Image (cartoon, grey):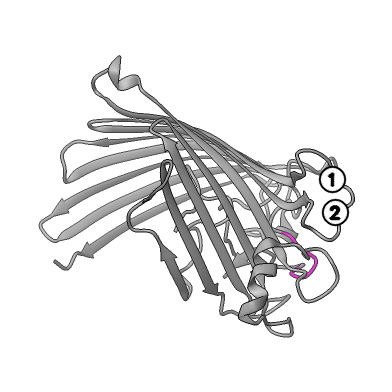
Amino acid sequence: MNIGPGEYGLLVSNNTEPYPLIMFQTEEPLIFLGDWNFLLLKGWLLEDRDDVDDPEILALRLLWKPVSFLELGATRSELYGGEGRPGYKLTEYPTLILGSKDNVPGKFDNDGYGGYDFTAYLPLEKLVPSVKEVKLYFENTGTDIKAFWQEEDKDKVSFPFFALTKHGLKYGLSISTNRDIIGIEHVITSEDTYRHHKYPVEGYTYQGLSLGYPYGNNVKSLFFKHKHNFTDSVYLEYKVGAYEQPVFINTGDRMRRYYASILGGWKIKDYDLEGFLRLDKTENYNSHAVPLPSQTGDIEDADKTFYILGVSIRYCFQ
């Protein structure tokens, strides 16, 4: 489940292990001054943690496409509850969703996020017939907002009465042809993204993996990928990229990781065969293989190289 444009969602992605959830979404767009799509997700993160056991996650997504070449999205997510933390009646969920009492001492002080995104579809297929789709996208998220409906900010905000703070930013380009998909994406997440004083150790994670962007907070990331479909049943995809972390701390070293991967797939009747190879070269290795938000600064003065090889076979029931 990725929410938002691009390879991975900044607020909800498929980076983690599966967890129990209930999801409602539109199967077909609702038509009113354009196409509308909605999504509502509630999940239970059942795990023993070093801060609060068994928290829950709530996510909402609204997508509006007023014209064929423009798509506007808004996303809201909240990490809340858990052992020793307050629960909510159904009538209290509007307050939870609005986040009007986030960061105000009390039962509604949770780890809340909000964001908006724009996707522009460029009509280049008229100039290059082999091109099926070209899209530019931008996403801006925040782990805090200043808005007139928030108790802590209602007397402090001015026009336009709404602002995101402690940002996560994503910029990307995707080009699709009859046989190829090419993409490039750049992501920046702030030092405070995926961290909260109510969940100070493991933060916005599940089973040690980020619920949002896979590389977590305090990071700059860039990648390029290309997928080629030789036939309808055989494909090859490669990706090259790099990221550094932590980028917003002036003292100490930064981990820099460069990687290249290749993925191949072949569909034979009801079977899907895949092979995967990845090479990671790391400068100033982080002592935690997958750093939690509280561990991004735990850097060793050591360089390491990793290889990952995988093979999978899936049977598809008809």
Distance from the alpha carbon under mark 2 to that under mark 1: 6 Å
Relative to 35, is 61 on the left or the right? Answer: right
Q: Which residue is mark 1?
A: 157
Foreground of the two, 79 or 300? 79
Foreground of the two, 98 or 131? 98
Magenta region's main secondary structure? Answer: loop
Marks 2 and 1 in Cβ contact (< 8 Å): yes
Quadrant of residue 49 in the image? Answer: bottom right
Relative to 92, is 233 on the left or the right? Answer: left
Q: Residue furthest top?
A: 127
Let me know if residue 66 appears in the view.
yes
Q: Position of residue 154 (x, y in %)?
A: 85, 54
Viewport quadrant of the C terminus: bottom left
Q: Position of residue 294 (x, y in %)?
A: 75, 60
Let me know if residue 7 appears in the view.
no
Crowding at dot 2, Cα within 10 Å, few <14 / some 14-19 / many 20+, comes out as some
| Helix, strand or loop at mark 1 | loop
Foreground of the two, 61 or 192? 61
| Helix, strand or loop at mark 2 | loop
Q: Which residue is mark 2?
A: 153
Relative to 77, is 247 on the left or the right? Answer: right
Crowding at dot 1, Cα within 10 Å, few <14 / some 14-19 / many 20+, comes out as some
Q: Residue furthest front?
A: 32
Quadrant of residue 160 in the image? Answer: top right
